[in-house]
Image (tube, rainbow, N blue to C red):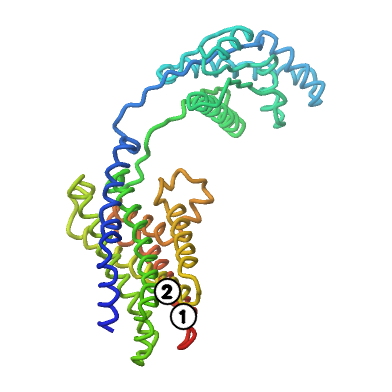
């Protein structure tokens, strides 16, 4: 068995071009991407934004009492006297004024500048780019909101938010307004349950939430881990592709003539893949750490955990190498096999966050990505870096062990019997 492992290691190490690619290119990419995404995860930088919003108030609050009373009698079958009492109590709640107070509060004024304009003037300024967006409060909005709150029916009128084009600032403004509406609805619900009379609009709080992590997880760490795992996938494909070289140079035929069990050939590939992947990822992690201080002030236990998880990934990918090797031996074209392996590598790399931050993918693709080998490795190392607690990585570790056995079983099942290899 030792000779098989030595054979595969020597075949790979003789290819200096491939060796330098998997060792040096990820480090270069980590440095470049670290500068490109500098500050993306930093929480200490003060974010400044000056959002310009035009407010067009078409509602007449002086008519609220009459409108609300009339509608309660007409649509909700209230008695005249009862409708009057309810309308007078509800009139104390002023949604429009609460909205304006919210937008002009000290906290929001740091982000938003409100301009009170007529609709025509506001539309012109938005079209010219002088303002980011406009908010129209339609006629009867107050009465309709109060009626909906009293009867529990959905409102028939709503705030109208208009923009010239979708931008980051216009979307942020929409979030501000949506936050107020959600808070107002919440306060309405609280009032109904507690039979309260006062409503106070509360400003939705922003910022970072402390989830109890012992250490921060930054973008440099993300790219170091993700790119190390990505190029490990390339190592797997390369190890499998070297089988084509062995077939071309009749090495595989000499192994068969030596009466060695074919499974020893496959296990040799898997063992070589484990050794190469461990060396490759550790090289990327350690060199990146010494160049950029990726994991500062971490304990010896932390590095032992890193080593164990790298070995775990190496075993998972060795199972993938077994599948690739078995597939190549069953195919007549080495180039076609190479195309399949590269397609699989690109797929795993994309879904697992190797080419760009996984957080940029839709949620459903993120869920799929966490079930790729490199995606699991990214998830388990993220937990370990932040908490350094073995209990947080037990489940993911079991998943990776399961993938190792699954991939190995598939590789053994696909591996051709003696005399069946192409």
Query: Label 2 neighbourhood size at 10 Å, few (<14), some (14-19), many (20+)?
Result: many
- The image shows residue 59, relative to residue 147, as above or below, that is above
User: Residue 82 lies in what quarter of the image?
Assistant: top right
The residue most toward the front is: 249
Quadrant placement of the N terminus: bottom left
The residue most toward the bottom is: 259
Expressed as whole percent of the image width and height from the top left, the position of residue 374 reads: 39, 59
Expressed as whole percent of the image width and height from the top left, the position of residue 110 reads: 40, 18
Question: What residue is shown at x 58% (from left), y 10% (from top)?
Answer: 122
Instruction: Please indicate whether residue 110 sits to the left or right of residue 35 in the image.
Output: right
The residue labelled by disc 2 is 325
Tell me the SS state at disc 1: loop
User: Residue 243 lies in what quarter of the image?
Assistant: bottom left
Q: CA distance from mark 2 to mark 1?
A: 8 Å
Instruction: Please indicate whether residue 34 sits to the left or right of residue 137 in the image.
Output: left
The residue labelled by disc 1 is 415
Mark 2 and mark 1 residues within 8 Å of each other at the beta carbon: yes
Tell me the SS state at disc 2: helix
- The image shows residue 37, relative to residue 330, as above or below, that is above
């Amino acid at each position: 068995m030792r000779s098989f492992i030595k054979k595969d290691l020597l075949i790979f190490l003789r290819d200096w071009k491939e060796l330098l690619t998997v060792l040096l290119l990820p480090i270069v990419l980590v440095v470049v991407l670290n500068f490109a995404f500098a500050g993306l995860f930093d929480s200490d930088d003060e974010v400044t934004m000056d959002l310009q919003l035009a407010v067009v108030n078409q509602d007449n609050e002086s008519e609220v009492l009459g409108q609300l009373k009339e509608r309660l009698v007409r649509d909700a079958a209230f008695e005249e006297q009862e409708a009057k009492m309810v309308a007078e109590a509800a009139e104390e709640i002023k949604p429009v004024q609460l909205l304006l107070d919210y937008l002009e509060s000290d906290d929001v004024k740091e982000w938003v500048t409100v301009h009170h304009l007529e609709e025509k003037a506001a539309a012109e300024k938005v079209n010219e780019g002088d303002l980011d967006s406009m908010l129209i409060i339609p006629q009867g909005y107050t009465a309709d909101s109060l009626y909906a709150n009293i009867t529990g029916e959905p409102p028939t009128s709503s705030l109208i938010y208009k923009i010239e084009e979708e931008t980051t600032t216009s979307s942020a403004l929409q979030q501000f307004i949506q936050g107020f509406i959600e808070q107002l609805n919440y306060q309405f619900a609280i009032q109904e349950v507690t039979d309260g009379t006062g409503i106070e609009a509360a400003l939705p709080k922003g910022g970072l939430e402390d989830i109890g992590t012992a250490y921060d997880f930054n973008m440099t760490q993300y790219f170091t881990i993700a790119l190390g795992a990505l190029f490990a996938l390339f190592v797997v494909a390369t190890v499998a592709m070297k089988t084509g070289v062995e077939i071309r140079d009749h090495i595989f035929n000499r192994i068969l003539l030596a009466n060695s069990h074919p499974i020893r050939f496959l296990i040799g590939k898997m063992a070589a893949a484990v050794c190469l992947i461990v060396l490759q990822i550790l090289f990327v992690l350690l060199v990146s750490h010494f160049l950029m201080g990726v994991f500062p002030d971490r304990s010896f236990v932390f590095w032992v955990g890193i080593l164990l998880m790298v070995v775990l990934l190496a075993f998972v990918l060795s199972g993938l190498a077994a599948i690739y090797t078995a597939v190549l031996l069953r195919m007549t074209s080495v180039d076609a096999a190479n195309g399949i392996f590269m397609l699989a590598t690109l797929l795993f790399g994309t879904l697992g966050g190797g080419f760009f931050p996984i957080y940029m993918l839709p949620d459903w693709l993120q869920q799929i990505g966490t079930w790729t080998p490199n995606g699991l490795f990214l998830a388990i190392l993220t937990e370990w870096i932040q908490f350094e607690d073995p209990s947080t990585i037990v489940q993911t570790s079991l998943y990776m062990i399961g993938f190792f056995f699954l991939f190995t079983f598939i590789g053994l099942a696909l591996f051709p019997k003696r005399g069946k290899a192409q």
